[in-house]
Amino acid sequence: MVQLLHEVWRSKDSDAFSIANKCADELRAKMEPEAELIHVIYASSWNEAMALYHEWRGWAPYKPMVGAPDPPYSEEQFREQKECRP
């Protein structure tokens, strides 16, 4: 099972959590060029990433939407992320 990189970025106004990819990098560079990387999380699905994020924040346990699919990340997604982040 693959794990993808997720990042927490801090700007003067807020923190942002997202999967690390080219689109997130480009948007952040335009919207918040002064943002600083403060934490990374590796997870095998979005729900796992959110659970780990909530734990890191000290928040209540993450509760996924009932019935929402949570497929594990694929090898293709892993390769795409590696191309952007060697």
Image (spheres, grey):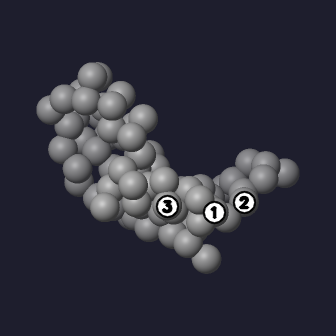
Query: Which mark lies nearer to you, 3 or 2?
Result: 3
Residue 61 vs residue 66: left or right? left
CB of mark 3 within 8 Å of CB of mark 2? no
Q: Residue at (72%, 57%) from the top-left corner?
A: 70
Mark 3, secondary structure of its residue: helix
Residue 49 vs residue 86: left or right? right
Report which residue position mark 3 lands on: 79
The answer to whether one can see residue 70 in this image is: yes
| In the image, residue 62 above or below residue 24 | below
**Kind of residue sitting beneath label 2:** Pro
CB of mark 1 within 8 Å of CB of mark 2? yes
**Kind of residue sitting beneath label 1:** Ser
Q: Nearer the viewer, residue 4 or 15?
A: 4
Spatial separation of the CA atoms under disc 3 and disc 1: 9 Å
Badge 1 density bin: few <14, some 14–19, many ≥20, Cα 10 Å: some
Q: Earlier in the sequence, mark 3 or mark 2?
A: 2
Report which residue position mark 2 lands on: 71
Query: Which mark lies nearer to you, 3 or 1?
Result: 3
Report which residue position mark 1 lands on: 74
The answer to whether one can see residue 61 in this image is: no
Q: Residue at (44%, 67%) from the top-left corner?
A: 42
